[in-house]
Amino acid sequence: MAQQPRFRRVLLKVSGEALMGGEEFGIAPSTMRRIAGDIAEARALGVQVAVVVGGGNIFRGVNSSKIGVGRVAGDNMGMLATVINALALRSALEDAGVEARVQSAIPMHTVCEQFIRERADRHLRRGRVLVLAGGTGNPFFTTDSAAILRASELGCDAVLKATKVDGVYSADPEQEPDAERYDALTYNEVLERDLKVMDASAVALARDNRIPILVFSLHNAGSFARALTGREASTVIR
């Protein structure tokens, strides 16, 4: 008998960099198809799935000063990059046979819906994957903060943070092979140790709303569904 998922409704946070695969910029088609397939597998378990995508594969607002663009304009550019990624992910999901909708915090009615909580909730209840773009719609807030914010608004049981490693470490394991891996942490431990899993405001918001965060690697096919059923290596923050 297949294992049952631990959650009814979740939010998956996918960074823009994860969409690059082995490329240096943009979207790797094979990686996008694999991620869409992973989400389709999770939906087949009966889990309602919302996704927040980053835009770092196209533009990172925090680095905008390097090209002479101010932080506010740079963050707005980064939020637009997340819409590009969201539209691409929706197409990949539909190719995988999954009905999906894109909602953006920045109104752009000719390409996607505006985020409206009641409508977003209805999409999830009808079995659609909801891809959320535009961050929070405000500069100076990361897509990590957007993920926790939307999970709070939509009553998600957990946020799953997809990364390049299988959990939270005391340091970057690629730079420090002896870094300690944690199976579980509290929100306050993450903040006090300055562990770089999410920005501090996102972790604090998750703590205030009691939303657990599961950190896992999205690099292996099927890892999302396995994380939902407790069969994938991960770190839980609660």
Image (cartoon, rainbow, N blue to C red):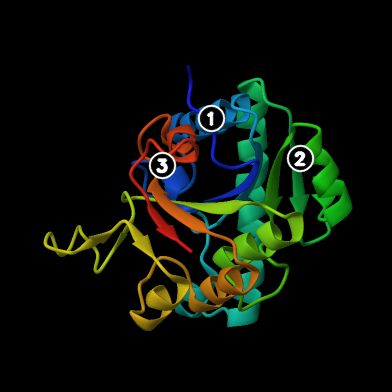
Name the residue beneath numbered marker 1.
4
Q: Amino acid at mark 3?
A: Leu
Q: Residue at x 20, y 63 (%)?
A: 180
Q: Secondary structure at mark 2?
A: helix
Viewer-side residue, 139 vs 124: 124
Q: Residue at x 66, y 20 (%)?
A: 97
Nearest to N terminus: mark 2 or mark 3: 2
Viewer-side residue, 169 vs 69: 169
| Front of the two marks 2 and 3 | 2
Query: Whole-percent x and y of residue 163?
Result: 40, 52
User: Disc 3 versus disc 1: distance between alpha carbons?
Assistant: 20 Å
Asked whether, in this view, residue 199 is left or right of residue 175, the answer is right
Compared to 41, does 168 lie above or below?
A: below
Toward the left, the furthest residue is 178
Q: Amino acid at mark 2?
A: Leu
Query: Whole-percent x and y of residue 74?
Result: 59, 73
Q: Does any portion of residue 45 appear in the rendered image?
A: yes
Nearest to N terminus: mark 3 or mark 1: 1
Q: Residue at x 47, y 37 (%)?
A: 224
Asked whether, in this view, residue 147 is left or right of residue 3, the answer is right
Viewer-side residue, 229 vs 217: 229
Query: Whole-percent x and y of residue 17?
Result: 44, 52
Q: Does any portion of residue 134 appear in the rendered image?
A: no
Name the residue beneath numbered marker 3.
218
User: Disc 1 versus disc 2: distance between alpha carbons?
Assistant: 19 Å
Compared to 181, does 130 lie above or below?
A: above
Compared to 158, does 130 lie above or below?
A: above
Other-residue count near label 1 (Cα within 10 Å), few / some / many at <14 / 14–19 / ≥20: few
* Dot label at residue 124: 2
Other-residue count near label 2 (Cα within 10 Å), few / some / many at <14 / 14–19 / ≥20: some
